[in-house]
Amino acid sequence: MVSLPGGSLDSWTVKSIVGTMFPILVVLSILELGSGFVLETLEETYLGNPTLLVLVPVMIDMGGNLGAILSSRLSTRLHLGVLEFDPRDTVLWTNILAILALAGTIFTILGFVAYGVGHLITGEPMALWDLLVISVVSGMLLAVVAIVLSIGATYVSYKQGLDPDDTTIPVVTNVCDILGVIILSVVAIAVLGGPPLHVVLLEELGAMLVVF
């Protein structure tokens, strides 16, 4: 079992909290611009299938929320000194399976809700099966990413002697925002057809370089 050295209260100072979180938030804020760039690059794909736009905010929000739940539970166990970074830790696996079960349930429901909203807004929503596949597959992939990020961020915080309460949730939620858009876009392109995401991004970057 592991716990934070020196006691968790040692990090409860303005200097410690700001010193830890400020550089992290600056870097994450810059990276967040990437999700906007992806959305702008795939504007035609999303406008051609407006029902997909219903998925975007919920997808990135729920991915971050699931990661935040696991990060919070891991941080609590670390502070209590009962966390084990061991594949045989049954409590850790219970938490992971709970997150995956939540993701499967939420993103399945999201597919049906998005279909209904799309029907109300456009009158001609995407095929329900396509929407369910996009929602569930991208949602489960994002949940796996959130789990890996949560465990990784907690472990790195522990090894560096940082308070995971200051680091894990900002890292997990912001990175899930970025990767959520990318994963959703990749899955949508795979299901609906179209040029691969990296090809579209390279073309957009090339066009920007020509302008400059």
Image (tube, rainbow, N blue to C red):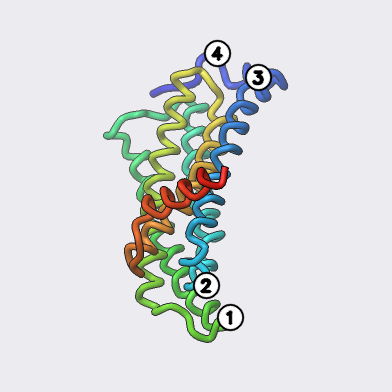
Q: Earlier in the sequence, mark 3 or mark 2?
A: 3
Query: What residue sits 41% from the left and 29% below the top?
Result: 83
Name the outermost residue toward the top. Answer: 6
Element type where label 4 sits in the image = loop
- Relative to 93, say whether 38 is above or below: below
Q: Look at 57% across and 83% down and name the residue there.
A: 120
Q: Nearer the viewer, mark 3 or mark 2?
A: 2
Tag 1, which secondary structure?
helix
The label number, if any, that marks residue 201 in the structure image? none
- With respect to residue 109, does 16 lie above or below? above
Q: Earlier in the sequence, mark 2 or mark 4?
A: 4
Identify the disc placed on residue 121.
1
* Residue annotated with mark 2: 50
Q: Amino acid at mark 4?
A: Gly
- In this rendered view, identify the residue nearer to me: 187 or 72: 187
Disc 3 marks which residue? 16
Task: Return the disc, 2 or 1, that comes first in the chain's sequence.
Answer: 2
User: 158 left or right of 12?
Assistant: left
Question: Which callout, 3 or 1, points to the residue nearer the camera?
Answer: 1
Whether residue 11 is situated above or below residue 46 in the rendered picture: above
Query: Of tags 4 and 1, which is closer to the observer?
Result: 1
Residue for badge 4:
6
Pointer 2 local density, CA inside 10 Å: few below 14, some 14–19, many at least 20: some
Residue 176 drawn at (x, y percent): 49, 46
Between the residue at mark 4 and the residue at mark 1, the CA separation in whole angstroms equals 56 Å
Disc 3 and disc 2: Cα gap in Å? 45 Å
Check whether the beta carbons of the residues at disc 4 and disc 1 lie within 8 A of each other.
no
